[in-house]
Image (tube, rainbow, N blue to C red):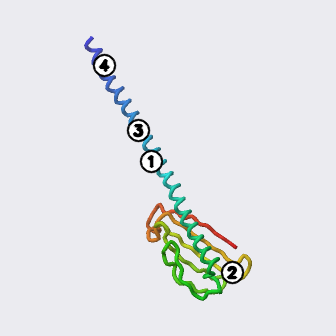
């Protein structure tokens, strides 16, 4: 009789170790899935930030082109701003040559290039928005770029 109880105690220890191991594996798997879901949802959010920055840059270029024609031959030079940030001085370099500027709406970088073409369509605007600041694009491993191209 004493011999039977010793065998059962060993089996109980083995069974409890097996159940604890299974629960640990289940918990680790759930943690890994949750972590990946958080990363995936943050990528969606960062993608929206990059798109909004590109949209802001395209709208800025449209404003200055339609209202003041600072990228065309009508103005020789002009200083402009967007989101209270100076974009620089623009001088018409000739048809087919890109004019570029960058600024940071809401702390996120946007780089815009405007090209005036002597054919129809006459203007090409390419706005590249990022989910991070301009200085951190090269060093941030999770930097995202979204672009908008306007041709008119």
The alpha-carbon separation of the residues under discs 2 and 4 comes to: 89 Å
Q: How many marks?
A: 4
Q: Quadrant of the N terminus?
A: top left
- Precedes in sequence: disc 1 or disc 3: 3
Q: Which residue is mark 3?
A: 27
Q: Is residue 32 above or below residue 151?
A: above
97 relative to 43 in the view: left or right = right
Give the class, few, some or many, for how many residues have Cα within 10 Å of label 1's Cα (few <14, many ≥20): few
Q: Is residue 87 above or below residue 26?
A: below
Q: Which residue is mark 2?
A: 117
Q: Secondary structure at mark 3?
A: helix
Q: Residue at x 48, y 75 (%)?
A: 85
- Between label 2 and label 4, give the one nearer the viewer: 2
- Precedes in sequence: disc 3 or disc 4: 4
- Between label 2 and label 1, give the one nearer the viewer: 2
Coordinates of residue 104 in the picture (x, y in percent):
48, 70
């Amino acid at each position: 009789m004493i011999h039977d109880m010793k065998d059962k105690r060993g089996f109980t220890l083995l069974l409890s170790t097996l159940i604890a191991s299974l629960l640990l594996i289940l918990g680790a798997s759930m943690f890994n899935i949750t972590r990946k879901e958080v990363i995936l949802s943050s990528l969606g959010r960062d993608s929206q930030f990059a798109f909004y920055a590109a949209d802001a840059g395209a709208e800025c270029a449209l404003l200055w082109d339609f209202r003041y024609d600072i990228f065309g031959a009508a103005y020789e030079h002009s200083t402009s701003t967007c989101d209270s940030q100076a974009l620089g001085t623009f001088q018409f370099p000739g048809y087919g040559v890109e004019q570029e500027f960058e600024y940071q709406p809401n702390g996120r970088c946007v780089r815009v290039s405007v090209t005036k073409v002597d054919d129809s369509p006459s203007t090409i605007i390419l706005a590249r928005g990022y989910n991070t600041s301009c200085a951190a694009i090269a060093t941030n491993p999770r930097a995202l770029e979204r672009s908008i191209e306007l041709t008119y």
